[in-house]
Amino acid sequence: MLKQDDPFRCTAAKLVKFNLIRRVSHIYKDVLVLNPFATVTLTRQDAKISSSVCAIDCSWSRANDELKYRKAASHGIQRRLPLLLAANPTNYSRAGMLSTVEALAGSVYILGFRERAAELMNKFKWGHTFLELNANILEEYSKAESSSGIADLEKAFFPQLY
């Protein structure tokens, strides 16, 4: 948590407050790190190589600097979350502009933990909207066997971006 956003709207802080996630100061080498600049896409197969997911909570306006150049962000197993639609009030319906809770929920859903994804999103008034908006997409991503399968699905669901 880099504390760059409005503390009253920070989804990571709310999840920490309710003990749904924990704040970490060090990222271990066997942790999946969500990084929008990573070259490898998250798939359900990643559940076999790690039991933890880490999201670096920072402002989208500073994400480029924070995630490309910050040493802490280079630790762990770097994975890019496949494209999903945001449901948060700031970036509603924008592809890829997810809040921290949306990124975490999307990743755990893809890894096969659907109930955990719902548990995370239930703490937000708009949380159910994220899961509803992305229901078909998340289900297909969670079935994909490889990064290339995910890439094909991204092209099918978001042809305007390719």
Image (cartoon, rainbow, N blue to C red):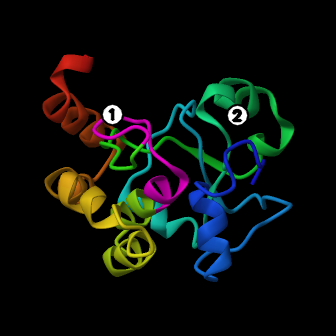
Q: Of label 1 and label 2, which has the lower sequence position?
A: 2
- Whole-percent x, y for residue 71 in the image: 85, 38
What's the residue type where badge 2 is placed? Leu
The answer to whether residue 102 is magenta is yes
Q: Picture quarter containing residue 41?
A: top left
Helix, strand or loop under label 1: loop
Say above or below: 137 vs 142: above
- Whole-percent x, y for residue 102 in the image: 43, 55
Q: Who's the residue at 74% across and 25% down the image?
A: 65
In this view, the residue in front, 82 or 17, is 17
- Whole-percent x, y for residue 91 in the image: 40, 37
Q: Picture quarter containing residue 86?
A: top left
What's the residue type where badge 1 is placed? Ala
Say above or below: 42 vs 90: below
In this view, the residue in front, 149 or 107, is 107
Q: Do residues under tags 1 and 2 come within 8 Å of each other at their CB atoms?
A: no
Helix, strand or loop under label 2: helix
Q: Quadrant of the C terminus?
A: top left
Q: Who's the residue at 37% across and 42% down the image?
A: 82
Q: Quadrant of the N terminus?
A: bottom right
Say above or below: 75 vs 118: above
Q: Is residue 52 visible?
A: no
Which residue, given by chain and number where applicable, does mark 2 sit on? 67
- Whole-percent x, y for residue 106 in the image: 39, 57
Q: Who's the residue at 39% across and 49% down the image?
A: 88
Q: Which mark is residue 65?
A: none
Which residue, given by chain and number where applicable, does mark 1 sit on? 95
In this view, the residue in front, 146 or 86, is 86
The answer to whether residue 149 is magenta is no
Question: Residue lying furthest front in this view?
Answer: 8
- Cα separation between marks 1 and 2: 19 Å
Q: Which residues are magenta?
A: 90-104
